[in-house]
Amino acid sequence: RVGPVQISLQKADQKKGRFSITVFVDDRSVEKKDRTIGEPIQFYVKGAQRTSPYEIVIFEVGKDQATGYLSTPKEGAAAAAPAKPAS
């Protein structure tokens, strides 16, 4: 969990560099299936600055884990918050 965002890794394919995650935010969940390493995943958070989306980028996939970062809008928040490996 980073701020209002929680990420759950559903599937990781280290060999093909693909993964599936579920993003939980604002009492909603959105499943992002079969994404590739380096592919930005963008979404909006209720109450945040609507002109800029939050963005998740996964840059490494291992067995049952993924490593990447969560970028937040600059309004009143840090430019980027590092993410812990999801498992």
Image (cartoon, rainbow, N blue to C red):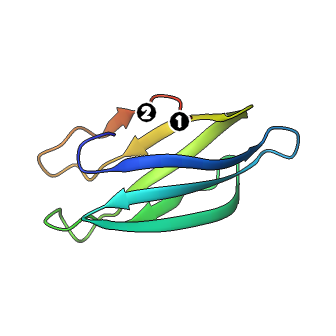
How dense is the environment of label 2, judged by Cα within 10 Å: few (below 14), some, or many (20 and up)? some
In the displayed structure, does residue 78 sit left or right of residue 83? left
Instruction: Give residue 51's quadrant in the image.
Output: bottom left
Quarter of the image that includes the C terminus: top right
Task: Give the vertical position of 31 relative to 10 (above or below).
Answer: below
- Say which residue label 2 marks: 83
Q: Nearer the viewer, mark 2 or mark 1?
A: 1
In the image shown, does 50 or 33 lie closer to the viewer? Answer: 33
Q: Amino acid at mark 1?
A: Ala
- Say which residue label 1 marks: 86
Q: Which mark is residue 52?
A: none
Q: What x and y, as percent, mark residue 11? A: 69, 49
Task: Give the vertical position of 10 relative to 78 (above or below).
Answer: below
How dense is the environment of label 1, judged by Cα within 10 Å: few (below 14), some, or many (20 and up)? some
In the image shown, does 38 or 32 lie closer to the viewer? Answer: 32
As drawn, the residue found furthest toward the right would be 15
In the displayed structure, does residue 37 sit left or right of residue 71? right
Q: Amino acid at mark 2?
A: Ala
Measure the C-alpha gap from mark 2 to mark 1.
8 Å
Q: In terms of secondary structure, where does tag 1 sit?
A: loop
- Cβ–Cβ below 8 Å for labels 2 and 1? yes
Q: What x and y, as percent, mark residue 62? A: 73, 31
Q: How many marks?
A: 2
Residue placed at 26% from the left, 65% from the top? Answer: 27
Instruction: Give residue 65's quadrant in the image.
Output: top right
Quarter of the image that includes the N terminus: top left
Q: In terms of secondary structure, where does tag 2 sit?
A: loop
Residue 34 appears in view:
yes
Residue placed at 34% from the left, 38% from the top? Answer: 80
In the displayed structure, does residue 16 sit left or right of residue 40? right
